[in-house]
Image (cartoon, rainbow, N blue to C red):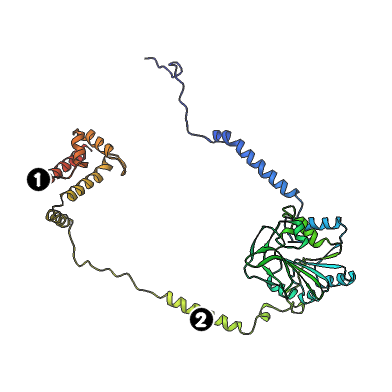
Amino acid sequence: MSVVTPAEAGLEESRPTSPTARTIWRSGRMIVLMGVALVLIGLLVVMLRPAQGPERYLDPDDTSLSGSKAIAELLRDRGVTVKRTDSAEAAAANANAAAGDHLLLITDTTYQDRDALAEIPGDRLIVGVPSMVLHDLAPEARAAPVPARTRSREPSCGLPAATAAGSAFMGGAALRGPSGTTGCYPVGRDGHALITYSHAGGVTTVVGAGDFLTNQRLAEDGNAALALNLVGTGRTVTWLVRPQDPPPLINPGDAGLSMHDLMPGSIRWGIYMAIIALAVTAFWRGRRLGPVVTEKLPVIVRASETVEGRGRLYRARRARDRAAGSLRAGTIDRLTPRLGLDSGAGQHEVVAAIAARTGENPQAVGTALYGPPPADDAGLVGLAGYLDLMERQISELR
């Protein structure tokens, strides 16, 4: 007897279809190599990128989006002297040196002596400071407790610096000033995002938010024109910003003290009370509840008695439909796994499988499992017998 190979018979030789390590590497090596290349490029970009310091809001030397380097350079191009300072003492010295021809621009008063700032004579422009600070620098001005949304607004006033600039990105605090105040860029009911008024030492201008001075917003609307009109008046500008090196919060003489020395004397009583409360809570929640107690059931009801009792109830109420539904549902639940069907199998699948196993008429099987309820007790008894017969036939076939 000659043996014919698949190649001689004109058939292709069977090969395994499950992936191997070699086929996986061949199919996915390009993706792996591209991922490694992207990671290396990202690391190279991060390493070669010049280090940048933290963003400083409204700082004339900061080139980030929140800084104000752009407007400071525009002012210098127009011949305005911009002196950046981070202390109230330096701002006062610049004001005295300018002999009245001076504008104090205040953008941040953190770690500053506000009383010293309030005593500096001359005009001042206060931008975006909190309401509690505004009371010290401009006592005549008032700010609403709820800030307004910053957006593009029309000036709606007669101030030349604002009307010439037009719409600007304004908002923040809703400001009100004393009698004779000029208010621009209305916000809220009767507040303004910009107010200006005269006082004994000069002219005070307060702006609710300083976003229009940032590098990010300067080119929008009339922000640049408004900034130049307010600041670029030809006078020396002292631009007060937050100091980069804040002063220490503790007295240098206390540097040699330990943490225990710096604690108040009453702190130990709080620690003692916390320890006592923790111990009481642990004792309360950690007590033993004792072993689990088993309790005998007062009445034991056999399964046959339960079935018989439910049957009597169905018979008394003539609930043949519910009785037939219970019989059919129980039969389907028991036969479905025996037939190799899922629990969610449809009516046609169940009927076809039972008919194929038992040889019964599919129409009779479908009527028995999914048909109308029996009309009388005899029909119910006949249905129960037919369902039992189908179960016994399928069990014997297995």
Q: Quadrant of residue 182?
A: bottom right
Q: Identify which residue is drawn at 22% across, 47% down.
A: 330
Q: Identify which residue is drawn at 77% across, 55% down.
A: 224
For label 2, count other residues whose C-alpha is less than 10 Å away and answer few (under 14), some (14-19) or many (20+).
Answer: few
Q: Quadrant of residue 252?
A: bottom right
Residue 276 tag number: 2
Give 33 or 113, whichever is nearer the viewer. Answer: 113
Q: Is residue 307 left or right of residue 134?
A: left
Give 140 or 157, whichever is nearer the viewer. Answer: 157
As helix, strand or loop, the secondary structure at mark 1 comes to helix
Between disc 2 and disc 1, whose residue precedes? Answer: 2
Q: Is residue 67 visible?
A: no
Q: Identify which residue is drawn at 77% across, 77% down.
A: 115
Q: Is residue 386 left or right of residue 226?
A: left
Numbered-mark total: 2
Relative vertical location of residue 226 with respect to residue 122 in this rendering, above or below: above
Q: Is residue 28 visible?
A: yes
- The amino acid marked with disc number 1 is Ala
Report the mark closest to the observer, 2 or 1.
1
As helix, strand or loop, the secondary structure at mark 2 comes to helix
Residue 141 on image: x %, y %: 71, 73
Point out the image quarter for the C terminus: top left
Q: Identify which residue is drawn at 53% across, 82% down.
A: 273
- The amino acid marked with disc number 2 is Ile
Point out the image quarter for the N terminus: top left
For label 1, count other residues whose C-alpha is less than 10 Å away and answer few (under 14), some (14-19) or many (20+).
Answer: few
Residue 260 on image: x %, y %: 66, 80
Residue 135 on image: x %, y %: 71, 75
Measure the C-alpha gap from mark 2 to mark 1.
78 Å
Relative vertical location of residue 184 with respect to residue 389 in this rendering, above or below: below
Residue 378 tag number: 1
Give 316 or 180, whichever is nearer the viewer. Answer: 180
